[in-house]
């Protein structure tokens, strides 16, 4: 393919060359185990602790509050199961939202099968949680509230500052999945007021398979993997030294570029969203109009089918995402869009374009040129279009 326009940065990001360069020595000459006492081990330990200092400083935490993990999924599992199991004496009630990533929803389903009570808060048509609903849902059995910082499909940023005032007053832990925000918008744990915060390196130009969980001092949490005494007995297993160094390097780059990049991407995002609304009849942006991730442009292009759009765009060299996932032969519309009250036949037409460091104005204009005829063609052949016309 002569042209590749990658617009799926919410799924993963390419590693920065500087990140790879920083990681390289830890695969070969600096291969020591950080738990070993001799020089080679101590050097690896030093690299891990320097990385911890940097990651902690970036989120306004103490280094001892940062636990390195294998990524966002493990961090979410550790937060939810680790807090639930450690606080069994207090209660068995967890509050979350229906728009979370599967890495939060599935541990909650797992716990529900074992007798835990899970409350799923409603969200409005923009995917926004109302803090008043958090207040209403808390009981004396509530041990954890888990609400994502920003949604990975529609980009809506949740009002964690207000929610944390409530959880603090009620003495309930607050966890947030910040995988889509860490390194992209400010994620200071004290400003947000959270007790646990999940991070994944590959969503901020770092390597796959490494992440972190912030755990506020004093939080009662048990490990989910048992073995060695690494990470202060909170997460067993030999450190992924190169990965951890890569995460810290990605954080160093974010420190430098986050503010200017957020501004640049917000402009490109709005150019794309406005262009879609202008050029495609009945294009309906999804997510909050302003409280959204700088890089997220998502919309329902009513009448065109999501996976067909994705494949047509791919043929033109554009990588995109559709909320629908083809599971077991049935096309399930996105759980996020359904929870926002979007009817299934409209949710099937969702397209998510997420921008990143290599995205240019020319890329956006190219997409705005090729997308309208694709949608026109798909609408002409889609049964969804008939369903939609019937509704007008
Ligand atoms: C990508 C993602 C995850 C999973 O992170 P991994 O490091 O891929 O396991 C969790 N939550 C959200 C919101 C994500 O976007």
Image (cartoon, rainbow, N blue to C red):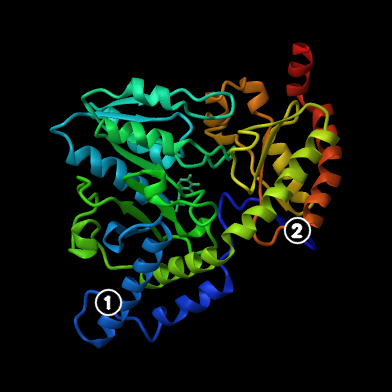
Vertical comparison of 2 with 213: above or below? below
Earlier sequence position, callout 1 versus callout 2: 1
The quadrant holding residue 338 is top right
Where residue 371 appears, x then y in whole percent? 81, 42
Say which element carries label 2: loop
- Quadrant of the frame with the N terminus: bottom right
The quadrant holding residue 113 is top left
Vertical comparison of 369 with 47: above or below? above
Vertical comparison of 369 with 37: above or below? above
Q: CA distance from mark 1 to mark 2?
A: 42 Å
Q: Which residue is mark 1?
A: 33
Please state if 215 lies on the left or on the right of 229 as rendered: right
Residue ID at (29%, 36%):
168
Please state if 200 lies on the left or on the right of 253 as rendered: left
Residue ID at (16%, 34%):
88
Residue 312 in view of the camera: no
Residue ID at (42%, 52%):
188
**Dot 1: within a 10 Å radius of its alpha carbon, few (fewer than 14), some, or many (20 or more) residues?**
some
Residue 334 in view of the camera: yes
**Outermost residue toward the left?**
89
Say which element carries label 1: loop
Q: Which residue is mark 2?
A: 360
- Quadrant of the frame with the C terminus: top right
**Dot 2: within a 10 Å radius of its alpha carbon, few (fewer than 14), some, or many (20 or more) residues?**
some
Where residue 127 appears, x then y in whole percent? 54, 30
Q: Is mark 1 within 8 Å of ligand 1?
A: no
């Amino acid at each position: 393919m002569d042209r590749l326009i990658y617009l799926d940065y919410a799924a993963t990001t390419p590693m920065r060359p500087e990140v790879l360069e920083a990681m390289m020595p830890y695969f070969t000459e600096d291969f020591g185990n950080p738990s070993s006492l001799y020089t080679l081990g101590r050097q690896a330990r030093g690299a891990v602790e320097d990385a911890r200092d940097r990651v902690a400083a970036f989120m306004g935490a103490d280094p001892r509050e940062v636990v390195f993990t294998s990524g966002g999924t493990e961090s979410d599992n550790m937060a939810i199961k680790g807090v639930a199991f450690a606080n069994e004496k207090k209660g068995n009630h967890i509050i979350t939202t229906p728009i979370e990533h599967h890495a939060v929803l599935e541990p909650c389903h797992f716990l529900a099968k074992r007798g835990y009570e899970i409350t799923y808060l409603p969200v409005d048509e923009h995917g926004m949680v109302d803090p008043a609903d958090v207040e209403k849902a808390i009981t004396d059995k509530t041990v954890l509230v888990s609400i994502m910082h920003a949604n990975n499909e529609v980009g809506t940023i949740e009002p964690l500052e207000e929610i944390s005032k409530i959880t603090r007053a009620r003495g309930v832990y607050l966890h947030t999945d910040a995988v889509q925000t860490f390194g992209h918008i400010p994620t200071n744990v004290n400003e947000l007021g959270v007790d646990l915060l999940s991070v994944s390196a590959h969503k901020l130009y770092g390597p796959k398979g490494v992440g972190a969980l912030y755990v506020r001092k004093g939080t009662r949490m048990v490990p989910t993997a048992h073995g060695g005494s690494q990470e202060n007995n909170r997460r067993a297993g030999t450190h992924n030294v190169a990965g951890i160094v890569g995460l810290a390097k990605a954080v160093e780059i974010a420190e430098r570029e986050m503010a200017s990049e957020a501004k640049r991407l917000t402009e490109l995002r709005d150019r794309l969203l406005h262009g879609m609304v202008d050029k495609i009849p009945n294009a309906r942006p999804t997510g909050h109009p302003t409280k959204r991730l700088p890089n997220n442009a998502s919309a329902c292009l009513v009448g065109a089918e999501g996976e067909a759009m994705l494949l047509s765009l791919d043929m033109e060299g554009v990588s995109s995402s559709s909320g629908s996932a083809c599971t077991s032969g049935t096309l399930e519309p996105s759980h996020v869009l359904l929870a926002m009250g979007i009817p299934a036949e409209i949710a099937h037409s969702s397209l998510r374009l997420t921008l990143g460091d290599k995205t240019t104005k020319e890329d956006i204009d190219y997409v705005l040129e090729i997308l309208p005829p694709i949608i026109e063609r798909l609408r002409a052949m889609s049964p969804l279009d008939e369903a939609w016309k019937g509704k007008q």
